[in-house]
Amino acid sequence: MQLVHEKIGKVVVVKPLETRIDGTVAAEFRNEMVAFIEEGAEALVLDLSAVDLMDSTGLGALVASLKMLRGKGELVISGASGKVTSLFKITKMDQVFRIFANRDDAVAALNP
């Protein structure tokens, strides 16, 4: 699983370079996200602009990452495609994660 990340103020922006977050990469994706949290990241933006498809295993990995924050931080979504946004809506995860149209808006929301 290829990810790039950068720190903007207190926010860590994580961008998967894969076009799919599914069963083939979900465990590795979860491990990478957990590593950021274990290193102290409490404000994370997941930039999904390169992701065309996420399935239930990818969503499960994302929820596991959120649980690792234990209420001490926030993980928000940015740049999700139509299919990925639909998955969040169908599963009602759009009520769990704040979703932003672009990375800059997401970073601004977490960097007061």
Image (cartoon, rainbow, N blue to C red):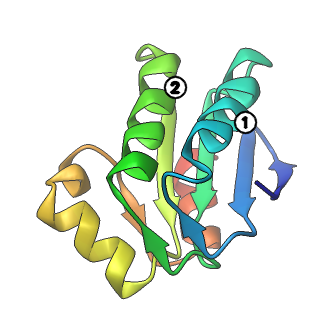
Q: Which residue is identified by label 1?
A: 32
Q: Quadrant of the C terminus?
A: top right
Label 2: which secondary element: loop
Amino acid marked by disc 2? Gly
Residue 54 percent across, percent down from the top left: 43, 65
Label 1: which secondary element: helix
Residue 112 shows in this picture: no
Point 37% across, 73% down: residue: 84
Point 72% across, 53% down: residue: 13
Residue 75 percent across, percent down from the top left: 50, 41
Q: Which residue is identified by label 2?
A: 73
Point 68% across, 39% down: residue: 28
**Considering only vertical position in the picture, is 60 above or below 41?**
below
Real-space Cα distance between discs 2 and 1? 17 Å
Disc 2 crowd, CA 10 A, few/some/many (<14, 14-19, 20+): some
From the viewer's side, name the closer residue of 81 and 106.
Answer: 81
Q: Are marks 2 and 1 in contact (CB under 8 Å)?
A: no
Residue 7 percent across, percent down from the top left: 84, 47
From the viewer's side, name the closer residue of 73 and 63.
Answer: 63
Point 44% across, 13% down: residue: 70
In terms of image quadrants, where is residue 16?
A: bottom right
Left or right position of 20 against 10: left
Disc 1 crowd, CA 10 A, few/some/many (<14, 14-19, 20+): some
Left or right position of 29 against 12: left
From the viewer's side, name the closer residue of 31 and 23.
Answer: 23
**Considering only vertical position in the picture, is 61 above or below 80?**
above
Q: Nearer the viewer, mark 2 or mark 1?
A: 1
